Image (cartoon, rainbow, N blue to C red):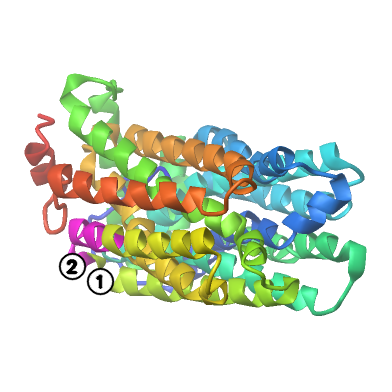
Amino acid sequence: MQPANTVLTYNAAKVPLNRMVVASAMTASLGGLLFGFDTAVIAGVTRALTTRFTLTPTSLGFTVAIALWGTIVGAAGGGYAGNRFGRRDSLRVLALLFIVSALGCAFAWDWVSFLAFRCIAGIAIGASSVLGPMYIAEIAPAQWRGRMVGSFQLNIVFGILVAYFSNYVIGTFNLGPTEWRWKLGVSAVPGLLFLVMLFRIPRSPRWLVDKGRIREAECALNQIAGAAATSELAAIEESLASDRRAGSQPLFSRRYRIPVMLAIMIALFNQFSGINPILYYLNDIFARAGFTKVSGDLQAVAIGATNLIFTVVAMCIIDKVGRKKLLIVGSVGTFISLALISILFLTGKHQNLLLWPLGSFVAFFAVSQGSVIWVYISEIFPNSVRAKGQSLGSFTHWLTCATLATFFPVVAVHTAAAPFIFFSSMMVLQLIVVIWLFPETKGFTLEELQYRLETR
């Protein structure tokens, strides 16, 4: 579940890492942890919400998906807010939204108020997926940028694991009817930590230069780049001048038809794997297989740990193995795993083994689609339309995610196997499309990829 607009940054000199750069990147990546936590924590309270608000499968789907519809708004407005008010200050507002939404959900007095606060969480999630990576990209040294921006994705996955573990721990306290309120409200604590830490990091130097605040940019660069601050400032000014000369170019034109097609397809297939509905309704899926509430919470922790481990694996091998090969391996692995889950639910036998194919599915997804999507989208578009292209990929991703999460329980209430049959068939289609249409991007410069994709 992951980041949007990536921005070209200064790269005139080899800038060593220092404490301020590391601290700033870690702080911004905390938005990813809250992103992951708030999207996954709902899995541990769906049954309680169904009882408390007398939800039908349709209204439960809407309750879970309301945050996802909010992410669309947040993703669309996050870039504007970051440009208008600055990346750091906009992140501070998002931290407040995370805190308000957590406390609001914990004290929700009726279904409508709960929906309102979950939607606020969604807006914060969507905007953080744009602003967090953008800020990190703009303060990180060029030679470390990929790994440091990748820390945001790693924190998303870690946040998912923390949410599952938090649900399990709170579930062991037997808090009764108020348990779901504690599970949702606890995220106010990391939200408060995020807010406090944001007052200890500098503004983005690139944003300051763009606003003509050169003296402040110099101060920020002295903290971040040290002795290389002068050359970095010159590189930023040159980059911004080049961007202004290029001007705005339309994304939907014949020239960019191939990157646009690839971005839409990889975003669609990412969600047609079923990863987000499965993570959101994980406890319900285990319940359908006969697991108890506490047992289901514990199984979810195992799934979250698997997700984290294989995301780390992917970050280590993606530049060696290549994007296309990972997508092919992931397509085959997720298809087999989803097919096995379908068989378990169709036959009604051996459902106590559900953890294994579910864990296998998450592992294959994390090492392929989950880690490749944002890297791939950022590579296939030329500089002049990269931000627009990534926005298109992000919008497609969130819209599909919200739609699937809305209708998953409506379909699953009739037959638990049906969604998994659909997801597994989509992975077969993805395998064919990737082999036939997707180019490998590993090892090519952006200019070489532009030529190969016939965008000139």
* Between 196 and 409, the one nearer to me in the picture: 409
Which residue sits at x=34%, y=66%? 367
Crowding at mark 2 (Cα within 10 Å: few <14, some 14-19, many 20+): few
**In this rendering, would 107 be left or right of 12?**
right
- The quadrant of the rendering that contains the C terminus is top left
The answer to which quarter of the image holds residue 324 is bottom left
Tell me the kind of residue under disc 1.
Ile
Which residue sits at x=69%, y=56%? 42
Report the residue marked by disc 1: 317
The answer to whether residue 1 shows anywhere in this view is no
Residue 353 x/y as whole percent: 52, 76
Residue 234 x/y as whole percent: 28, 47
Badge 1 element? helix
Badge 2 element? helix
Q: Are marks 1 and 2 in contact (CB under 8 Å)?
A: yes
Residue 327 x/y as whole percent: 26, 57
Crowding at mark 1 (Cα within 10 Å: few <14, some 14-19, many 20+): few
The answer to whether residue 197 shows anywhere in this view is yes
Residue 381 x/y as whole percent: 24, 38
**In this rendering, would 14 be left or right of 224?**
left
Between the C-alphas of marks 1 and 2, the distance is 6 Å
Check the image and report above or below for 332 versus 210: below
Specify the label residue 321 is tagged with: 2
**In this rendering, would 292 be left or right of 1?**
right
Tell me the kind of residue under disc 2.
Val
Tell me the magenta residue range: 319-330
Check the image and report above or below for 288 versus 137: below
Q: Is residue 122 magenta?
A: no
